[in-house]
Amino acid sequence: MFVLDGRTLALDVAFQHRGIQYPSNWLRLASAEERAAIGITEQADPPLWDQKFYWGYDSDNNLIPKQLDDVTDDDGNVTTGLKTLWKAKQNEIAASLLAPSDWRVVKELEVNSSFANARTAYPSVWMTYRAAVRTACNTRQGEIDACSDVAALKELLFGDARIDQDGEMVANPNLATAWPDPVE
């Protein structure tokens, strides 16, 4: 990033310095010597962080984690924690996986004279798939509840599939249970 007099300059944005207006493409077109001549320095961009899990960095350059569990203040106001948010997300994912086959359940109930007949007429591959989705959702929510810190939760949900263990690439044991493969 470029800094002039303590102010960050954005690329492709015009700026003014000592009464001179510089066009929006000046930072890209100017040489390092031209930028230095008017006092522009280049600094490393601040470190990035995953905003789903962290607020940013503190003054000691440590990540500030978001609240893992729900917190209720003295007035009864609840601040929703990451575990609750991510468990709700698992419900949303499960619903989106089940929705394409919902019509099959309704159809079987409509065309059969009883629930028992509908259940036996419904293809078992779909019943198995739908049960696997619900089981995976429940398992994933249990895994989320078992996380003891924000780093573990992030690894559970977004960790690399393979990790280096003693110089050998192995499957990451800290990942959440996989969702079932869709039925064709």
Image: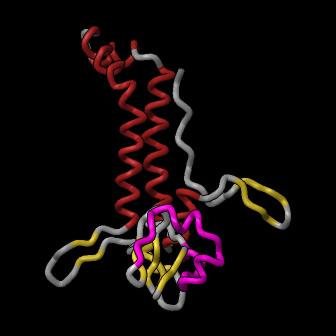
Q: Is residue 9 above or below residue 41?
A: above
Q: Quadrant of the C terminus?
A: top right
User: What span is colored magenta in the figure?
Assistant: 20-47
What residue is at 40 percent from the left and 16 percent from the top?
Answer: 122
Residue projecting furthest to the right: 167
In the image, residue 128 lies at what x, y percent? 49, 29
Query: Where, by quadrant of the figure, is residue 18 drawn?
Result: bottom left
Residue projecting furthest to the front: 20
In the image, residue 132 lies at what x, y percent? 49, 36
Q: Is residue 172 left or right of residue 18?
A: right
Q: Is residue 79 left or right of residue 81?
A: left
What residue is at 38 percent from the left and 51 percent from the top?
Answer: 89
- Whether residue 137 can be seen here: yes
Is 36 one of the magenta-colored residues? yes
What residue is at 38 percent from the left and 74 percent from the top?
Answer: 67
Is 169 one of the magenta-colored residues? no
- Whether residue 53 can be seen here: no
In the image, residue 2 lies at what x, y percent? 53, 76
